[in-house]
Image (tube, rainbow, N blue to C red):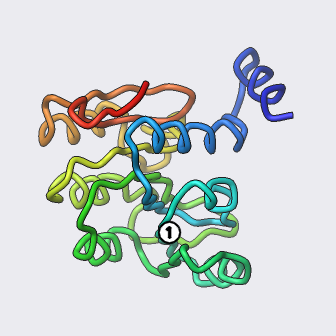
Amino acid sequence: MAKGRIEVWMHRPRKGPPDSLKRETVVEYARRFGLGTLIETGTFHGKMIKGVMKRFGKIYSIDIAQHLIDEVSKWVPNHVELICGDSSVELPKLMEKIDHRVLFWLDAHWCKNESGKGPVNCPILDELDTVLQHTYDHVLLMDDARLYGKDGWPTIDEVKVKVLSVKPDWWFEVKNDVIRAHSFNHLCVI
């Protein structure tokens, strides 16, 4: 089922890839880099958590909307920690207790209808300030590349400049609607 949807998406005009492709990307990067912790911004209805929770020993997920945190908290297992608040405020607090490299799925943004809204439509630049200054060279996946440069979001070039100005030797690419940034030094398996 998932492969069929992915093939259709790859060959037709599209809004965004199927959730299965996003989950496969997260799992692939966790495997490649040997990472057992996921930090997600933008919990929404918890589709990413549900799809990858068996792969990670620990998952942190931050969302600004209390009603979404309440909804997801009804079914998440103990190794998933939900944090309610603006990711630009809560992520720096969380990073104080992170003492190893982790995989990031950065997907916090305003969705108009049922999501919460912070001071900006997409807090990715604040999130990057926090993650890139941290002690470890984390692995970054940023969702919804097709939306960058629209509706108050920074452009992909602005994100690239932000990442490479702090980590000039990192790999940076956009593929299947996901911006990917990481060091070559910690790559385990391809």
Q: Above or below — where is 36 with respect to 190?
A: below
**Residue drawn 73% across and 78% down?**
75
**Residue drawn 47% across and 79% down?**
83
**Residue drawn 65% across and 82% down?**
73
Q: Position of residue 28 (x, y in %)?
A: 53, 36
Query: Going by the picture, which residue comes out furthest to the right?
Result: 1
Which quarter of the picture shows residue 4?
top right
**Residue drawn 47% across and 52% down?**
105
Indicate left or right for 168 with 142 as reference: left
Q: Position of residue 118 (x, y in %)?
A: 44, 71
Indicate left or right for 41 with 170 as reference: right
SS class of the residue under badge 1?
strand
Q: Nearer the viewer, residue 46 or 64?
A: 46
Q: Nearer the viewer, residue 62 or 119?
A: 62
Q: Above or below — where is 129 with respect to 28?
A: below
User: What's under tag 1, amino acid-wise?
Assistant: Ser
Q: Quadrant of the N terminus?
A: top right
Q: Position of residue 45 (x, y in %)?
A: 69, 66
Q: Nearer the viewer, residue 58 or 62?
A: 58
User: Which residue position holds label 1?
Assistant: 61
Q: Residues within 10 Å of mark 1 (few under 14, many from 20)?
A: many
Indicate left or right for 51 with 42 as reference: right
Q: Quadrant of the C terminus?
A: top left
Query: Going by the picture, which residue comes out furthest to the top?
Result: 11
Q: Position of residue 10 (x, y in %)?
A: 70, 19
Q: Above or below — where is 85 with respect to 49?
A: below
